[in-house]
């Protein structure tokens, strides 16, 4: 038997799911993580989630369920981190395709239960927007999580929701979430995060990076790229809360409203009605603003050059001084990359220099700002 987990929001939730699985069942326990191919435009320049037809090299595990392997690839112009995640994470990865709406999602989950010979589902969300009531002004991406809740309810198998690092995604404030969550079930430790050690050298997830850093004892004020409001890492940021699927559904009106959604377009309309916006439309608008009305392009921007060169190193030091003056102790890799406009190669060169020190800036998977730079 394999354990079945669902990374509720896609993106970095699959990373968090691997760490939560290690805490619950041990790092070597067989597992399958279902996840969306729904990522930031810096990874996938095409707005919205990808379906199984957007990939080559996936492995059928049912009529609708497809497994992602290191040999899978997104069809251009789409992009996806899932094939590389499949190489770096110990649990296997299965693709959640929401384009067929609630009937299709429920069938994929049912096929995954049969494939794993599992009798229950663990739903994992980093940050806690899976418990949104739809009114929070900082809410940005409620649809994927709500679709998972509704689909699991339709399947009817026993399921529990694990919220790791309340507030770390900066969508539902921590002080709003905690009364909905109750006491933590357990706390992630540095040992639980060893299974994701290699991921953050390249993956742009910020919420999962903050969670892993908190589990490893990093504390202080961290600046992300996703939001202008900094995140303060405390002991509570490594907590994992557990609640029954039924309670999560009661807390999430969008999930309840999605019960009959026949396809992704209908789900998007439901999000507009309940929450007042569609995150997919926001992605379309941002893609147009980035000069890619058809969703094409690499989504990264031009490199600032060889980050190991003297000029680029000086540019980093000047940026570090300005950023530290904002009262930040740490930053994410994504913030460095995007604000300095570095491609993967240039950031790799900078990362090598940052790791070499002195002074030490390594607070893996975050970076410590040196205030005397």
Image: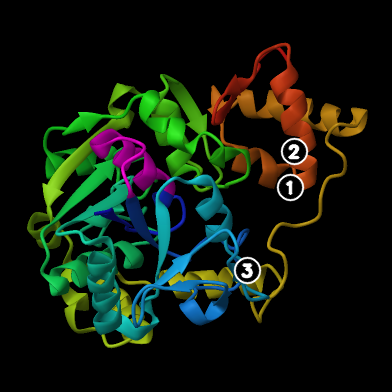
Residue 328 appears anywhere in the view: no
Per the rendering, the mark at residue 344 is 1
Residue 322 sits above or below residue 67 on the image:
above
Asked whether 22 falls inside the magenta stretch, the response is yes
Task: Please say whether residue 199 is visible from this viewpoint.
Answer: yes
Q: Main secondary structure of the magenta part?
A: helix
Read off the residue under disc 3. Answer: 45
Q: Measure how far apart labels 1 and 3 are at the Cα level.
A: 16 Å
Which comes sooner in the sequence, label 1 or label 3? 3
Residue with the mark numbered 2: 348
Give the quarter of the image for residue 71: bottom right
- Residue in the picture at 23% in, 65% down: 113
Direction from residue 113 to residue 222 in the image, left or right: right
Viewer-side residue, 67 vs 48: 67
* Secondary structure beneath label 2: helix
Asked whether 72 falls inside the magenta stretch, the response is: no
Residue range in magenta is 15-30
Residue 255: image quadrant is bottom left
Residue at 24%, 54% (x, y): give it.
1
The local crowd at label 1, few if under 14, some if 14 to 19, many if 20 or more residues have their Cα within 10 Å, is some
SS state under label 1: helix
When the figure is inspected, residue 312 is found, relative to residue 338, above or below; the finding is above
Q: Quarter of the image holding residue 274?
A: bottom left
Task: Tell whether 90 sits left or right of 171.
Answer: right
- Label 3 to label 2: alpha-carbon separation: 22 Å
Residue 119 lies, in percent from the top left, at 14, 59
Which callout, 3 or 2, points to the residue nearer the camera? Answer: 2
Figure quadrant of the C terminus: top right
Image position, residue 62 (x, y; %): 34, 77
User: Could you say where residue 319 lies in the image, as x and y percent from the top left?
Assistant: 73, 31
């Amino acid at each position: 038997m394999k354990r079945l987990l669902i990374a509720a929001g896609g993106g970095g939730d699959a990373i968090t799911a691997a760490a939560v699985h290690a805490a619950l069942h041990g790092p070597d326990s067989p597992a399958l993580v279902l996840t969306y191919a729904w990522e930031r435009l810096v990874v996938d320049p095409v707005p919205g989630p990808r379906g199984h037809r957007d990939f080559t090299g996936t492995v059928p595990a049912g009529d609708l369920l497809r497994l992602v392997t290191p040999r899978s690839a997104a069809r251009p112009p789409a992009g996806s981190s899932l094939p590389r995640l499949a190489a770096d994470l110990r649990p296997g990865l299965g693709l959640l395709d929401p384009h067929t709406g609630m009937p299709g999602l429920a069938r994929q989950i049912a096929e995954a239960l049969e494939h794993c010979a599992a009798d229950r589902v663990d739903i994992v969300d980093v940050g806690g927007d899976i418990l949104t009531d739809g009114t929070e002004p900082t809410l940005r991406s409620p649809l994927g999580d709500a679709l998972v809740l509704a689909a699991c309810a339709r399947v009817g198998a026993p399921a529990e929701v694990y919220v790791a690092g309340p507030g770390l995604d900066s969508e539902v404030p921590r002080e709003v979430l905690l009364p909905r969550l109750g006491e933590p079930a357990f706390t992630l430790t540095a040992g639980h995060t060893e299974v994701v050690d290699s991921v953050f050298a390249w993956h742009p997830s910020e919420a999962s990076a903050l969670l892993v850093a908190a589990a490893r004892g990093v504390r202080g004020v961290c600046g992300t790229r996703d939001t202008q409001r900094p995140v303060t890492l405390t002991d509570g940021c490594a907590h994992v809360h557990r609640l029954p699927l039924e309670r999560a559904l009661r807390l999430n009106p969008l999930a309840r409203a999605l019960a009959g959604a026949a396809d992704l377009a209908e789900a998007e309309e439901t999000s507009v009605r309940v929450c007042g916006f569609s995150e997919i439309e926001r992605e379309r608008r941002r893609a147009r603003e980035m000069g890619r009305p058809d969703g094409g392009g690499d989504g990264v921007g031009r490199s600032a050059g060889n980050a190991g060169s003297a000029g680029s190193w000086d540019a980093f030091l000047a940026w570090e001084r300005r950023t530290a003056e904002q009262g930040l102790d740490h930053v994410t890799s994504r913030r460095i990359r995007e604000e300095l406009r570095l491609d993967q190669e240039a950031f790799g060169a900078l990362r090598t220099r940052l790791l070499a020190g002195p002074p030490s800036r390594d607070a893996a998977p975050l970076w410590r700002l040196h205030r005397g730079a």
